[in-house]
Image (cartoon, grey):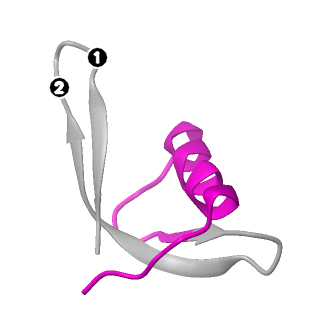
Amino acid sequence: MGKSYTDEQREDIAKQEYKPYKESDPVKIGKEKDIVGYVSQINDKSTGEQSFVIY
């Protein structure tokens, strides 16, 4: 089962999409910079869409 996040943490996670991640980079949130996962894959489509797989 996945971890439950507060509204503030969800907002912080959503803001992460604007950071220039590379594969294996940690994804950190909150004032304490807690690691919620690592980038395992970057999908960069020709349409301009970019998405990240976090594990």
Q: Is residue 7 left or right of residue 40?
A: right
* Quadrant of the snapshot with the N terminus: bottom left
Would you identify the image quadrant in which residue 15 lies? Answer: top right
Give me the disc on residue 25.
none
Q: Amino acid at mark 1?
A: Gly
Please say if the residues under marks 1 and 2 sit with CB atoms less than 8 Å apart: yes
Residue 50 falls inside the magenta stretch: no
Give the secondary structure at mark 2. loop
Residue 11 falls inside the magenta stretch: yes
Q: Position of residue 46 (x, y in %)?
A: 16, 17
Q: Position of residue 48 (x, y in %)?
A: 28, 17
> Which residue lies at the image location 31% right of the left edge and 81% below the top edge?
2
Q: Of 3 and 28, which appears nearest the observer?
A: 3
Reply above or below: 33 against 10.
below
Q: Of 31 and 21, which appears nearest the observer?
A: 31
Q: Which residue is mark 1?
A: 48
Q: Is residue 37 left or right of residue 29?
A: left
> Which residue lies at the image location 29% right of the left edge and 41% below the top edge?
51
Q: Which residue is mark 2?
A: 45
> Which residue lies at the image location 61% right of the left edge and 70% below the top edge?
28
Would you identify the image quadrant in which residue 9 lies? Answer: bottom right
Give the secondary structure at mark 1. loop
- Identify the residue at the far bottom of this view: 1
| Residues rendered magenta in the picture | 1-27
Q: Amino acid at mark 2?
A: Lys
Q: Is residue 30 left or right of residue 55?
A: right
Reply above or below: 27 against 4.
above
> Which residue lies at the image location 83% right of the left edge and 72% below the top edge?
31
